[in-house]
Image (cartoon, rainbow, N blue to C red):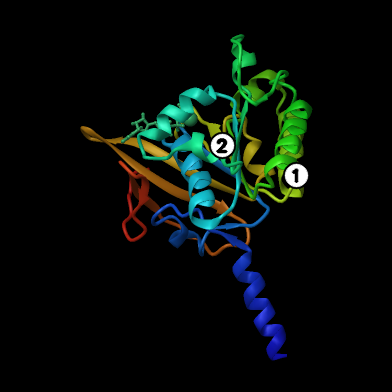
Amino acid sequence: MANKKKDEVESSESKRVPTGIPGFDEICEGGLLRNRTYLLSGTSGAGKTIFGLQYLYNGITKYGENAIYIATEERPEQVRETVKEFGWDFEALEDEGKLAILDACSTKIGVPSHEKYVDVRPFDMRSMMDQVIAMQEDIDAKRAFVDGTTSIGFYLQDPAKIRVELLKLSTTLEILGLTSLMTCEVVDPGATSRFGVETFVTEGTIMMYNNRADAVRVRSIEIYKMRGSNHSQSIHPYDITPDGIVVHPHEEVYTA
Ligand SMILES: Nc1ncnc2c1ncn2[C@@H]1O[C@H](COP(=O)(O)OP(=O)(O)OP(=O)(O)O)[C@@H](O)[C@H]1O
Ligand SMILES: [Mg+2]
């Protein structure tokens, strides 16, 4: 009996994947549930890309978990430049075989790519999944970040089709042993997703806001849904610092 309890404690500990983002794990019982996919929703500029990249960077550097990044909206070379501002050297991690980046952007906009991993059929979910499977064989990752889902949605148009394709993607990531974040860009600040179906295919939804309060904009974050977690019900302010995102778990904002 005593042994069983010990096993239970161990397995419940390993069930959580800490993001390592200061303050965030505190509002969700220590992190994300392992092998699950989460939606990161917010308006443009809300901080989704930085959050996702910080999750991957921390995974590699703090927790020894390799990572896959699927870039559908920005070219990988832009991303490598952006993260340098926070002191994150993605190129070194790629050289060490700890990080793999899929260029799912260049072909879509019709420019050549010299990346190691390129999705040549960027609107075809099957093609993206095949690439992820190949990358996973190469680096045995534990974390993935799909940035983002909106262009696939526009291409498919029909919400029923979008729902099925995103479900295929999230399930494939889970079967591959990846704990993942997928971004979703919303236009209406009150909405949780762009096409109204994305939240249904994921284990949880994290909302990021950058709303106006009088003469300034206030950044805040909310765990809107997280299955199996007794998460915070509040909206917490966060900052983008020279080291990346810092969430304030003991403070609340009232106007998200
Ligand atoms: N070094 C920095 N220090 C402070 N704030 C920064 C820094 N770099 C970026 N930002 C802020 O972060 C914002 C961009 O964040 P990010 O790219 O993560 O947004 P996003 O939600 O992914 O947007 P989109 O939907 O357009 O891709 C910028 O508009 C800027 O306000
Ligand atoms: Mg972005």
Q: Secondary structure at mark 2?
A: helix
The residue labelled by disc 2 is: 95
The quadrant in which the N terminus is found is bottom right
Q: Amino acid at mark 2?
A: Asp
Q: Residues within 10 Å of mark 1 (few under 14, many from 20)?
A: some
Q: Position of residue 93 (x, y in %)?
A: 53, 40
Up/down of 43 relative to 9, above or below:
above
Q: Residues within 10 Å of mark 2 (few under 14, many from 20)?
A: few
The residue labelled by disc 1 is: 171
Task: Tell whether 232 sits left or right of 219.
Answer: right
Q: Secondary structure at mark 1?
A: helix
Q: Amino acid at mark 1?
A: Thr
The quadrant in which the C terminus is found is top left
- Residue at horizontal 48 percent and vertical 35 percent from the top: 49
Q: Is residue 190 visible?
A: no
* Badge number at residue 44: none
Up/down of 169 relative to 72, above or below:
below
In the image, the residue with mark 1 has its CB under 8 Å from the nearest atom of ligand 2: no
